[in-house]
Amino acid sequence: MNTIVLEYILKIKHLFIPVLALLVGCHVPADRAMDGAGGRTSYNNVLQRTSKEQMLLNIVRLRYFDVPYFLDVGNVTTQFTYKTTVAPSFTIPGFSEKNPAKIAGEVQWQNQPTIQYAPVQGQAYVHQLLQPVGLRHIQELLYSGWSIERVFRLIVQGFDGLLNAPEASGPLHTDAKSYDEFAEAVKLLRKFQEMGELQIGVDLAAQDEDDEKKMAHQLQLAFPAEGKDAQRLNELLYGLKMRGKRYYLTLKLGFDKTGRIGVLPRSVLSSIYFLSQGVEVPAGDKCIKEIKYCNGGDQLITVRNCTHCPTNAFAAVKYRDRWYYIHEQDMESKKTFVLLQQLYNLKGDISTQPPPLLTLPLGLG
């Protein structure tokens, strides 16, 4: 009997020790906690995807004259909990033939995220969505590499008297037509930007020549005066002045004394209204007028629709029993959409110090 007990205990020892080491020795290393289904990259991907879906949903809502709504993610925290337990229990043979030995163990790994959402409303709504985009924000977007053509077509409602379809800055009831000369002017400015010859700056100037206490931002553009493109811009732009071999254009925010537009930016909400005209409406929705206007000449964005969840979408959202999406291969729409998201994020910055004058290199398009 003693020999049998000793041999069995030795066998249990060789079995139990590796299992105990496996259970007790397991832990969640830092790289595992940061990676995987509950790691940093996963949260990053989900937040990016849902941010795109929210913006796309609001573009579609405005196409249907629905109320836009935004929820910003205020904070994300997560807590990893790991617990192991082992409860060995064995019986010496001869005392119980039904249950000679058993080993029990338990492993628990929990990921407990906490996400705080903040509705954009009240003062935040006014600041982020309704106030016109500042000239400094326009300059920052251009400095980050964006095309002046895309930035101006999306954000600027008019400059130096040239109109960029102001009818499209809100609920549109008529076809917009007043954008041809604006579109031509910004396309020519884009050519100088591609050559690295366009300069843009924002500074403070007196709103009234007789009252230096009232200061406001003004936008300044400069580019070479030689060539047919420069000559055509001289024909289109009323306020161009030549100094040496360069043209200069100074644009005050709002209107001048004669009522002529200096530079008039849109708000973020107006920019979303502007892009909402690029949403393709199903044929059955006869209550929504088919607009001939394509958000400023060539289409800035195209939002398609289908009856099923698309598999080739850059961003997709379901609305009114249909799926609306931007195609993965539609680069022009993707660029405009990303620009809109960056503009929305920029409006959260309340700094008022204008950046310095810089030469603009070739941008994103």
Image (tube, grey):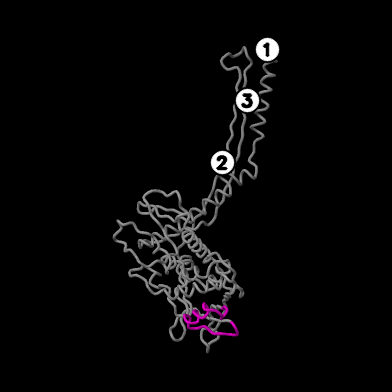
Towards the viewer: 102 or 332:
332
Image location of residue 9, percent across then percent down: 68, 18
Judged by depth in the image, the label closer to the viewer, 1 or 3, is 1
Identity, as a three-letter code, of the amino acid under mark 3: Pro
What stretch of residues is rendered in magenta? 222-245
For disc 3, the marked residue is 88
Towards the viewer: 352 or 114:
352
Q: CA distance from mark 1 to mark 3?
A: 20 Å
Judged by depth in the image, the label closer to the viewer, 3 or 2, is 2
For disc 2, the marked residue is 110
Using residue 71 as the reference point, say whether residue 293 is left or right of it: left
Q: CA distance from mark 3 to mark 2?
A: 24 Å
Whether label 3 touches label 2, CB < 8 Å: no
Which mark is first along the chain, 1 or 2?
Answer: 1
Was residue 232 drawn as part of the magenta stretch in this picture? Answer: yes
Whether label 1 touches label 3, CB < 8 Å: no
Image location of residue 155, percent across then percent down: 47, 70
Identity, as a three-letter code, of the amino acid under mark 1: Ile
Q: Callout 2: 10 Å neighbours few (<14), some, many (20+)?
A: few
**Which residue occupies 52% across, 53% down?**
47
Which mark is first along the chain, 3 or 1?
Answer: 1
Q: On the image, which quarter does residue 279 sit in?
A: bottom left
